[in-house]
Every structure is written in C-alpha cells, then in structure tokens.
Image: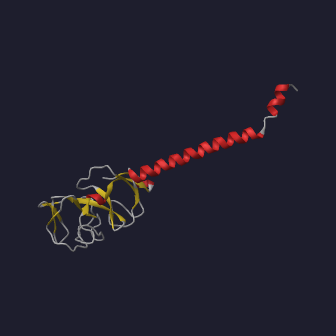
Amino acid sequence: MNEKDTNENNIEPKSYRKAFAKALFSTVSSLITAAAVIVLICNFVFPLFRVTGSSMEPTLSKGQTVLCNKSGDIKKGDIIAFYHNKKVLIKRVIAASGDTINILDDGTVELNGKKLDEPYISKVSSGECDITFPMTVSEDRYFVMGDEREVSVDSRTTSVGCVAEENIIGKVYFRVTPFGSFGRLK
C-alpha cells in the first residue's frame, strides 16, 4: 500500500462533521431568511385571507384562500378586504365617495339614478337593511355589499356602514385555494 492510499483512508471524521455542520447551518439560515421574507411580503404587500362566511357567494366560497394587493387602486365593482371590529371582512365596492346609492324594496340597486348591472349576484334581495335610502357616500368612504345579498351584513346596516379608506387592507384579486378554483378574480 502506498502513502497516498493510507492518507485518503485516514481522513479524520471531525473534518466531515465540521463540513456537515457548516452546510446544515447554511441551509437552515437560508430557509429561515426565505421564510421571513415570505412572511413580510404576505403581511405588508400581498396579504392572504381565508373566506369564512357565505356573504360573497357565488364569487367566493367559505374556506377559499384569497390574495390581496395593498397597493391596488380601488374602483367600483372591486372586491376588497377591510377591518371591521377587529375582524377582516370581504365585500364588493358598490359606490365611492360622492356617489348616490338607492336600494329599492325588491333589492334592486341604483347608483347615481341608474340601475346597477350586477352579473356577479345570483339573486336580487334587499337583505338586512336599517338605513334610509337614497344616500350619498361620504368623502374617503366606500359603500360595500356582499354578493349573496340575503345573508350579507354590509354597508346597508348601521353596524357596518360605509368603509373608511384607512380601514381597507387591499383589493382582493386572486384565489389561491382550493387549487381547482385557482386564478384571478373578476
């Protein structure tokens, strides 16, 4: 046996342990850093929410996970997530500041004197309502309603009212789960 073969067979296990420990530490550090970046992005730029009720059916169903965009420009017809009494609610924007909204006895919605085209609802319903119509939306506020009008508690009630801009988390624009319904919301 020559000297080279003897040296290769006698490599100390300590050097392997050190190399393994160094590689393991590097991998774990990278994973922790990546997880922290993902958490920061999800909290501050693209928050995720789980739909908990049926007030947005048929557009969104209970148990689905949706993605918000905090920097999105909010327009009428958009679905938004907002804070109300330390809970997150998800509703559709029907009117913005300065708009006049009227809801007829049968549940038909009029915006600025014209009947609103609402292809996203399955049934016209007046639902729970304890405010007087017509009403004009105050500055820096949005009038929101759920797509399932019979069960939605929304801006038609004094308990929710019009949503202030500072309470809006962002525009809901993407369905993440379940994977069969994965995709952009319209």
Give the x, y percent position of residue 60: 35, 60
Measuring from the top left, give residue 86's x and y in whole percent. Answer: 36, 66
The image quarter containing residue 14 is: top right
Foreground residue among 120 and 151: 151
Can residue 117 be seen here? The reply is no
Residue that appears at 20% across and 69% down: 107
Q: Could you say which quadrant of the image residue 1 lies in?
A: top right
Q: Which residue is found at the position 73% from the left and 39% from the top?
A: 16
Is 51 located above or below residue 68 in the figure? below
Going by the image, does 16 lie left or right of 182?
right
Q: Position of residue 114 (x, y in %)?
A: 13, 60
Point 55% across, 44% down: residue: 30
Q: Closest to the observer: 184 or 162? A: 162
Query: Can the viewer see residue 97 in this picture?
Result: yes
User: Residue at image x 30%, y 49%?
Assistant: 72
Residue 149 occupies which quadrant of the picture? bottom left
Q: Position of residue 5 (x, y in %)?
A: 83, 28
Left or right of residue 84, residue 134 in this image: left
Is residue 107 shown above or below 67? below
